[in-house]
Image (cartoon, helix red, strand yellow):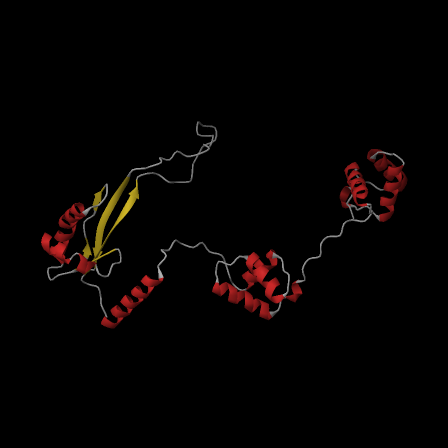
Amino acid sequence: MAPGRGGRSLSLSIRNIIIKLHKAGISPVKICKTLQDKHQFKTTRQSVRRFIIRFETTGCVHDKRKPRRPEHTKVRRIHMQFINMWMAQNPVMTAANIQGRLEKQCGIQLSKEYVCMLRRKLNWTPKHMKYGQLISHKNVKHRLDWCLDQLISKDSFRDVIYVDESTVEMCSSGRLFFHRHGSNMDRLPAKAPKPKHSYKVNVWGGISHRGRTSICIFSGIMDSEIYQKILEDNLLPFATANYPDGFRLYQDNDRNISLKYRLLIRSLM
């Protein structure tokens, strides 16, 4: 029933009285006064007006029935096992997908909120995923073969120097803006300025079981001459001092890098 003042609801007899007074041409304000004086019932003109509008629209003095919620008692152990299996197969499955599968395959209708509760009951908790490089099926097989070869040969990688380069953008990318009330920085800016093409530098370096190489910072595009200069100034002094008996060079996870640059290293030495 529609609530009146103080949480009271309009009973069926009060509603019939309101309809009778409304048909007599009495305004909602006077209806409220009549209800209070003659029937000792307090309500507001807004409640009376909402009831009159609903009555003229539907022609019914009763409240509209709320839609019946799905029966959650239909969930059985087999349904929980289905949810657990689907989540194990696809950890990014949403509650809407689970809801659709349960309705299509099991014939039960559940709300998304209840599905989320069932998923939490199965100890599936959300977590932010980190970025991971996608590997093709061809490279997956090659990497697996390479790992198995290293396990068989029991390689310790103590004579390997791992080198790589990375690009650093010389621009602030902070998303927090601190301001102080009552000062010139009181108003937050709509957008933070950011250059379209910020200045970038490249950083090259190497690590190994016996230490690290010196770091080389350069700008521009790395070509053959620049790379030979980097190896001559940074890699060879470190290799000569720490690996006089020879070493293997690995770059960008390439297992053939030692063969690729063998002639280059020999020519520089």
Residue 121's quadrant in the figure? bottom right
The residue at the far front in this view is 138
Pinpoint residue 25: horizontal percent, then vertical percent.
88, 34
Q: Quadrant of residue 254?
A: bottom left
Q: Is residue 85 visible?
A: yes
Which residue sits furthest top? 184
Does 215 sit above or below residue 179?
below
Position of 258 relative to 197 (above/below): below
Pick whichever, 136 or 53, lies toward us. 136
Q: Is residue 184 above or below residue 34?
A: above
Is residue 225 left or right of 177 when viewed as pictured? left
Query: Which image quarter holds the C terminus?
Result: bottom left
Residue 238 percent location from the top left of the image? 14, 53
What residue is drawn where x is 20% and y is 46%? Answer: 223
Question: Residue 216, percent across and down?
Answer: 20, 46
Relative side of 50 to 142, left or right: right
The residue sitting at 22% across, 50% down in the picture is 205
Relative to 71, is 125 on the left or the right?
left
**At 33% from the left edge and 63% from the top edge, which residue is drawn?**
138
How many numbered marks does the figure carry? 0
From the viewer's perspective, is residue 35 above or below residue 117? above
Q: Is any atom of residue 269 visible in this view?
A: no
159 vs 111, left or right, is left
Residue 69 lies, in percent from the top left, at 68, 57
